[in-house]
Amino acid sequence: METKRHLIAVDLDGTLLTKDKTISERNRKTLQKAMLDGHIVVIATGRPHRASVDYYHTLGLDTPMVNFNGALIHHPTDDKWDVLHNPLPRLTAHQIIDACYDLNVHNIVAEVMDDVYLDQYDESIINIFQVSRQDSPFTIGSLKNQLKEDPTSLLIHPKEENIQSIRSHLDHYHAELIEHRKWGTPWNIIEIVKKGLNKAVGLEKLAYYYHIPKEQIIAFGDEDNDLEMLDFAGVGVAMGNAIDELKTVARYVTDTNEQDGISLFLEDYLKFESKTK
């Protein structure tokens, strides 16, 4: 009997990656076995291309990738594949930047694809975005002056006491044009992308591209930027370390990212004959 082909979408941080930001050998082997069996594996992450492409190559993928929570959908190894880039309008970004200046936030970051614009020099912020010592996509200085293109995403590093007032401002003045989410601890960063964009939008496009029905989409995640994706997928799987809201939306809950939760689920669900330990 022919095995049904599944589209398997994996989030990176807190899902596929361990706390030291690596892919375990078991997870790598399991996903590669799934690919050998004819299933399609894709990465769907809030990260930009440059901070996820090494994991893409570690897995040996040859599929499109969803970056910036759906604001960028592209194929890292196929230039002929149409890039789908949906940035924020620059005017809206500048209005938000002005409001951030008024609220005296710690910092603001704008990303235009793989280029990073940093309002104030901050070593700890640079370390988040710097993939390697050779990687230096930074322009540092007033975003008011430096940002001349539509940004793929805007990130605000607020002062703790201003988080709610900033999110309320975004809801009140920009709700029709943007989506915003807060990163988990230790970074209470507010991430902003264009309205209507999330990982589910990217996953839907890829499912259409590969002719995979919704009930054969398996999606793994752990945070609130995975909510729409797990809700959309026929087989939404929350990690054991996921936020409670995601576990409520998910159809299944597996083990944590530290305990190879992806492998444990796929070995059982896809009925692998031998466990890939």
Image (cartoon, grey):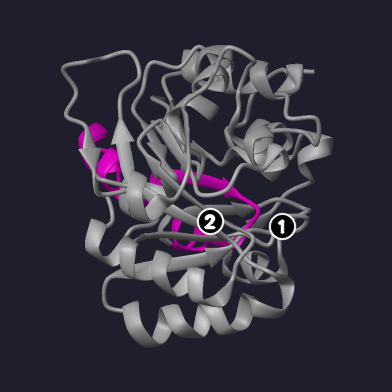
**Marking on residue 156:** none
**Percent x, y for residue 269?**
61, 39
Question: Which residue lies most toward the right here?
Answer: 259
- In the rendered view of the protein, which quadrant contains the N terminus? top left
Q: Is mark 2 on a helix, strand or loop?
A: helix
Counting other residues with Cα less than 10 Å from the Cα at mark 2, is it few (<14), some (14-19), or many (20 or more)? many
Residue span colored magenta: 203-231
**Percent x, y for residue 79?**
21, 15
Q: Is mark 1 on a helix, strand or loop?
A: loop
- In the rendered view of the protein, which quadrant contains the C terminus? top right
Q: Is residue 40 visible?
A: yes
Looking at the image, residue 64 lies above or below residue 261:
above
In which quadrant of the rendered view does residue 212 lie?
top left
Task: Compare residues 237 and 184 and report the one nearer the observer.
Answer: 184
Disc 2 and disc 1 in contact, CB within 8 angstroms? yes
Is residue 169 toward the left or the right of residue 146 in the image? right
Residue 149 is inside the magenta segment: no
Which residue is tagged 1? 242
Q: Can residue 203 be seen in this view?
A: no
Q: What residue type is labelled 2?
A: Asp
The residue lying at 33 percent from left, 77 percent from top is 174
**Percent x, y for residue 182?**
59, 65
Looking at the image, residue 214 lies above or below residue 263:
below
Residue 224 is inside the magenta segment: yes
The residue lying at 32 percent from left, 40 percent from top is 72
In which quadrant of the rendered view does residue 217 lie?
top left
Q: Which amino acid does label 1 sit on?
A: Ala
The residue lying at 59 percent from left, 34 percent from top is 129
Which residue is tagged 2? 226
Q: Earlier in the sequence, mark 2 or mark 1?
A: 2
